[in-house]
Amino acid sequence: MSQRTVVITDSSTGKSIECPVLEGTCGTPVIDTKHLYRDLGLFVHDVGFASTSSCRSAITYLDGEQGILMHRGSPIEQLAKHSTFTEVAYLLIHGELPTAKQMVEWDLSIKMHTMTHEHLTRFYQGYRYDAHPMSMLAGVVGALASFYHDPTSDYRTDVDHLLTARRVIGKMPTVAARCYRYLSGLPFVYPDNQRGYVDNFMNMMFSWPTERYEPNPVAIKALDLLFILHADHEQNASTSTVRLAGSSENNPFACVAAGIATLWGKAHGGANEAVVNMLEEIADPKNVPKYVSKAKDKSNTFRLMGFGHRVYKNFDPRATIIRQACHDLLESLKLDQPLFEVALELERIALQDEYFIERKLYPNVDFYSGLIYRALRIPMTMFTVMFALARSAGWIAQWIELMEDPDFRIGRPRQLYVGAARRDYVPVAKRSS
């Protein structure tokens, strides 16, 4: 059976090239254009890489039209219901779900890498008292590269990739919690290997030296679920950044730091902060109709945050899962959370309004995640840090896949140059004013 191809013809020269069409396990086929420049002298112009496949990957698949998200073939709905974050991390990195014995060994191996070098504790003191924790997280994770760096190593062949993964996943909660503790003026809390992954993180965040801390099991479950839902999401901006940084054969901690910097943007990981700001502005469920009208008014600058998605065109499967978790958490903690009532009313009205239905503006994962973080007493500036902590599992899985890719090459996007044509240098004395 012959391979499917697409013929691309340059109408100005009449020259053509036959490009093979590559089929994946699932999803849209892609056109292999790697010989386009060699044979036709042309590049592909694709702003934002919206129609470009930058790599082969077996880690995460999503179908925006159908609302499907799978990690290594496992549907996110099943992982959210039955799994844990550390098990999902194992799946992302190893490609298969662990046996009971492998899971015990994996959890123990992560616990063995939760500590950071004591010299690193001084690093935090260089930040202002009001620094954004994402700037601290990027800086400290970048600094970790200096503790695990051998300039003579080949990251593709000489480095133990699984050890690197355990280090990244193990140390991220410690670094994240210390960002919060420093900014809060609280003493650092060392990891406790008697606790589970999320339990340990919450202990490092909220415990006092004078008494034992016991987090609510429902709170642990809610945060673990959020970590699962944020663990990986295909080739988004931050993941693509990690891969691009890694393509220069860079230190893995430096690559993760680059991903953190990208995630910080309000159009990416900072969206859940924007949702809470919006809900606080609305303030009361009775004000929702007025703000929905503002959102529909093209002349008004108000935007509904947490609705719609760059990839998902019908619904975000993670939002359905997280909505119930938000209900369960607020009921268990017996919190008076008026913002949740505003969120519910906003969701109800928007999903019944033809304006939003036609434009497929549905609640996404950011719509509810900020409410859960708020219920857990996590400050708004730490929301994106939570996202980065979870996404580090996906980032390091993607980094490992890149290092082990036989088609490995440094990333080098092209451009469409629209600047001045050649201009010869004119000495300053001869230039007209």
Image: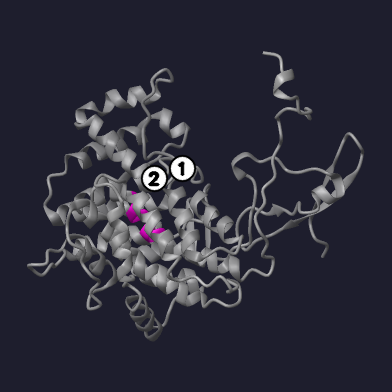
Majority secondary structure of magenta residues: helix
Q: Is residue 429 above or below residue 270?
A: above
| Tag 2 secondary structure | loop
The reply to whether the magenta stretch includes residue 385 is: yes
Q: In the rendered view, does 6 fall on the left or right side of 287?
A: right
Quick one: quadrant of the N terminus? bottom right
Residue 225 at x, y = what percent? Answer: 32, 61
Q: Which residues are magenta?
A: 384-391
Which residue is the site of mark 1? 309
Residue in the picture at 23% in, 34% down? 280
Which residue is the site of mark 2? 364
Residue 424 at x, y = what percent? Answer: 79, 28
Q: Is residue 247 above or below residue 363?
A: below
Quick one: quadrant of the C terminus? top right
Residue 5 at x, y = what percent? Answer: 80, 54
Which amino acid type is shown beneath numbered disc 2?
A: Asn
Residue in the picture at 45% in, 57% down? 257
Q: Are marks 1 and 2 in contact (CB under 8 Å)?
A: yes
